[in-house]
Amino acid sequence: MKNIFCIASILFIFIGCSSTYKVTNFPSKEKFYEEFNDTFKEKEARVTLVNDSSFMASDGTIIKDSSLVLYIKLVEKNNNGFALSSIADLSYDRDDYQKASILLKNNCRITAENVKIVKDSIYFVELKNIITTTTIPISEVKTTSYTNKWKGLVWGSINGLLSGGIIGYLLGKTAMPKPSKVQGGGHDESEDVSGLLLGSVAGFVSGGCAGYILGYPITYEFDK
């Protein structure tokens, strides 16, 4: 029960843990756009429209010419094949032997999957990372957000330290007295200190882990 109570208390702290930036927080709309572009140009972001539909921009997003430009990373797959004599090196992925890196003698490197060697030829599905763009008028955008894992780690560690210490201290205060103290009715104050220290350490570690996993939400809110 103690562990459940501690975990629940730490997770409770994360409710509402976020930063929201509005146009009114900046000297001008241009400054808001400039800060937005510096923040989101290379981050995976969730874009929510005024109709509450949402989707992901996997490779960043920027504001350009009164529109939100979303960069979305896709993997293009094409069937391909070469003569084995044109291959300089073939390295299979350690985690997935269906995938490989193929180096041609002209120094061109190819990422491939479903590699098959038949007699003097090699056949495979070539994988290419491509970036596509989608443009949305700013007037249709409600919010754009991302999660900062490192900020979540710091926030979680600090809050875990404080909440864990408080919980540990309270548990120490309510602990049953030791047999040597029962007759005298006293309370061993060392249990308070031990509970405070143990709770702080446990809260710092668990809070930091939870903060990194959950991340710290950062949201930019657009005027409707």
Image (cartoon, rainbow, N blue to C red):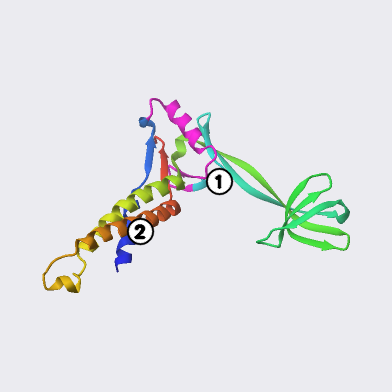
Quadrant holding the C terminus: top left
Write the start and end of the magenta stretch as one range.
26-54
Amino acid at circle 1: Ser
Residue 174 point in image, percent of width and height: 19, 65
Question: Is 95 left, or right, of 85 in this rendering?
Answer: left
- Say whether residue 127 is magenta: no
Quadrant holding the N terminus: bottom left
Is residue 148 among the parts visible in the rendering? no
Picture quadrant of residue 209:
bottom left
Question: Is 37 left, or right, of 208 in this rendering?
Answer: right
Residue 168 point in image, percent of width and height: 27, 60
- Say whether residue 30 is magenta: yes
| Total numbered labels | 2
Residue 27 point in image, percent of width and height: 38, 25
Label of residue 105 in the image: none
Question: Is 122 left, or right, of 71 in this rendering?
Answer: right
Q: Residue furthest left?
A: 184
At x 18%, y 74%, the residue is 179
At x 43%, y 49%, the residue is 215
Picture quadrant of residue 219:
top left
Label of residue 202 in the image: 2
- The crowd level at tag 1 (other Cα within 10 Å; few <14, some 14-19, many 20+) is some
Q: Nearer the viewer, residue 138 or 94?
A: 94
- In this figure, which residue is indicated by the disc labeled 1? 58
